[in-house]
Image (cartoon, helix red, strand yellow):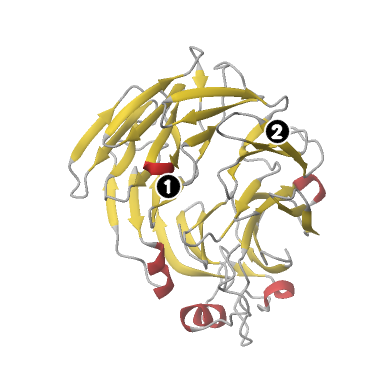
Amino acid sequence: MNKSIRGRALTGTALALAVSTVLTACGGGDSSATGAESDGTASATPAVAVEDPLVATFDGGLYILDGESLKLAGTIELPGFNRVNPAGDEDHVVVSTDSGFRVLDATGQAFTGIEYKGAKPGHVVRHAGKTVLFTDGTGEVNVFDPADLSTGRKPEGRTYTSAEPHHGVAIELANGELLSTLGTEEKRTGALVLDENGKEIARNENCPGVHGEAAAENEAVAVGCEDGILIYKDGEFTKIDAPDAYGRIGNQAGSDVSPVLLGDYKTDPEAELERPTRISLIDTEKMKLRLVDLGTSYSFRSLARGPHGEALVLGTDGAVHVIDPNTGKVEKKIPAVGQWQEPLDWQQARPALFVRGHVAYVSEPGKKALHAIDVETGKRITSVTLPKSTNELSGVVPGH
């Protein structure tokens, strides 16, 4: 967990935002938590910086919590179904709203005014010091340096527009290459790579239903397919086939200290909702795929990586399964929440796993609870009960 912001008072841009920002119906304050007046306008009392903030969504808004104590520091009203992702620095979180991506100063408990408008804001990817936004409704890709968010102004950055709008994802590599998915609203087929000048240098359309992304050690980048996974490494695409004719890997989690990616694995294309018990481990050095049966199902909010590259999966049995990515061995099961079942509607709340440093944060919507657990010792650090059940869970993650 980042200790560099311990005890900070709000200064500069953050202070100005906390004192003077008017929070509209898309960002009203809760006077009990933030010191904001009931009309949604911030009071004259400067807010105290939230340390290593977490952000959790609930039906109607956002909770901002202290990352160490889990104390509820602030509440922001925000109608609609909202999603949250780290922006890539120690202060900000990107919120996907009905109107587009909005940047929240989680430390200062206020929206910054920085917005990337567009229908159906989708994936937010952090890699090699850049943050990449993909807007599904327009196919637009925006790349920026998250350090520039501290100015309070919209960062100057790179943009790219896909040939067709689709539910996609993009990632910029350390050398400036941009990998972005290919597809239409009806069909997604693969990915292409552009050099730093925008010239296409690689393409692969052998990845039906392309979805999700992750980066492994030595900058091997993967996107999932309905019949395996597609790897881009050292300037070339390699397809790793699934052992089943339909073997969908739609969600992945990577680690900079492991060449092995963690993915989900589904085999029933006709299922209204498949509740898989197997996960996939993809070795980007050997270009091999291993399946591991956990004996419990999980959801798309269940995958994460530990501080040493451990593969972490929050099962419906209520435990965080800690898996050695090299062997596939489940090393331990950490009790976290009660047993649960994934709801049919993907927007409905279910337990979520968010890992930062050595701490796994696990939400338990059925009990309106949030828990902090030490990944290495398996011991619960603290828990909190919130006013309402939460859905998505994220926080600031600096220094990526």
Quadrant in the picture for the C terminus: bottom left
Name the spot of residue 135 as percent of width and height, x first.
40, 46
**Residue at 56% over, 25% down:** 265
Q: Quadrant of the N terminus?
A: bottom right
Q: Could you say which quadrant of the image residue 278 lies in?
A: top right
Q: Secondary structure at mark 2?
A: loop
Camera sees residue 207: no
Q: Earlier in the sequence, mark 2 or mark 1?
A: 1
Q: Residue beneath label 2, please?
A: 342
Three-letter code for the amino acid on which mark 1 is drawn: Ala
Could you say which quadrant of the image residue 74 lies in? bottom right
Circles 2 and 1 in contact, beta carbons < 8 Å: no
Callout 2 crowding tier (Cα within 10 Å): few <14, some 14–19, many ≥20 = some
In this view, the mark in front (2 or 1): 2
Please tell me whether residue 3 is drawn above or below residue 12 in the rendered image.
above
Left or right placement of residue 33 versus residue 190 in this view: right
Residue found farthest to the bottom: 44
State the residue in front, 58 or 132: 132
* Dot label at residue 257: none
Q: How far apart are labels 2 and 1 at the CA level?
A: 27 Å
Q: Does dot 1 land on a helix, a strand or a loop?
A: loop
Above or below: residue 346 compared with residue 96: above
Residue 110 position within the rendered picture, expressed as x and y whole percent measured from the top left = 55, 71
The three-letter code of the residue at mark 2 reads Glu
**In screen coordinates, is 29 left or right of 189?**
right
Q: Is 389 placed above or below 312 here?
A: below
124, 4: nearer the viewer: 4
Q: Which residue is mark 1?
A: 119
- Residue 335, position as x, y percentages in the image: 79, 42
Q: Quadrant of residue 179?
A: top left
Residue in view at x 67 percent, y 24 percent = 277
Q: Give the side of residue 399 with respect to residue 47, left or right.
A: left
